[in-house]
Image (spheres, rainbow, N blue to C red):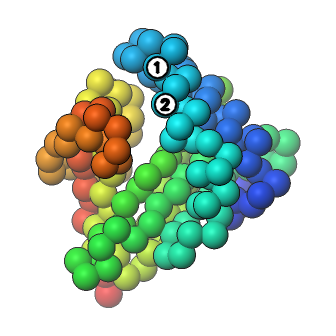
């Protein structure tokens, strides 16, 4: 059984491996293995993960069963005026998919931002599995971008889910 907890420096190597394996499993057929390796090295470097550990107004979590990291998620406030949070990462290792790890990570991210009105994300339009997951969890397509993450030149669909606030 996996438990969700805050990511720590001791998790970085396992997270790096999870991201690489998950990206190759998901995106090799879309971008090719060489491009996936290039993207993974850039977006998921040890340096970028370390920065997430201390980023203010964010949540960096893992799903851990005591022997391995089965999933990872990272979200941060993107606009505190409109009370919008951006989900930057939510990945579950291919061997662990279908065990509700993604739902547990998503739930923890939502709980971490109780004042948020909306949770937004960008997803590769050809990643039907991810889109199906997000739609099943209340996300709707609200737009598109030609520059996923604002720095890549890779197109993405933008999905958003309203969040209940008291």
Specify whether residue 59 is in view. yes
> Nearest the camera: 55 or 70?
55
Name above or below for residue 99 compared with residue 117: above
Q: Residue at x 37, y 16 (%)?
A: 30
Q: Position of residue 81 (x, y in %)?
A: 25, 82
Residue holding disc 2: 39
Q: Residue at x 66, y 35 (%)?
A: 18
Q: Residues within 10 Å of mark 1 (few under 14, many from 20)?
A: some
User: Which secondary structure, mark 1?
Assistant: helix
Q: Position of residue 149 (x, y in %)?
A: 35, 47
Q: Residues under labels 1 and 2: Cα distance?
A: 6 Å
Q: Residue at x 70, y 33 (%)?
A: 17
Q: Residue lying furthest left in this view?
A: 143
Q: Quadrant of residue 92?
A: top right
Judge left or right: residue 47 versus residue 79. Answer: right
Residue holding disc 1: 35
Contact check, label 1 and label 2, Cβ < 8 Å: yes
Q: Position of residue 22 (x, y in %)?
A: 57, 29
């Amino acid at each position: 059984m996996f438990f969700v907890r805050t990511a720590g420096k001791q998790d970085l190597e396992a997270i790096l491996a999870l991201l690489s394996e998950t990206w190759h499993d998901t995106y090799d057929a879309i971008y090719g293995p060489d491009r996936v390796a290039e993207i993974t090295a850039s977006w998921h470097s040890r340096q970028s993960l370390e920065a997430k550990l201390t980023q203010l107004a964010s949540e960096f979590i893992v799903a851990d069963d005591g022997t391995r990291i089965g999933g990872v998620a990272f979200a941060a406030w993107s606009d505190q005026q409109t009370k919008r949070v951006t989900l930057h990462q939510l990945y579950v290792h291919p061997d662990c998919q279908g065990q509700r790890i993604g739902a547990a990570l998503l739930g923890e991210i939502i709980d971490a931002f109780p004042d948020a009105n909306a949770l937004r994300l960008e997803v590769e339009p050809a990643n039907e599995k991810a889109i199906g997951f997000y739609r099943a969890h209340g996300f709707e397509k609200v737009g598109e971008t030609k520059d996923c993450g604002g720095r890549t030149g890779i197109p993405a669909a933008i999905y958003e889910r309203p969040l209940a606030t008291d």
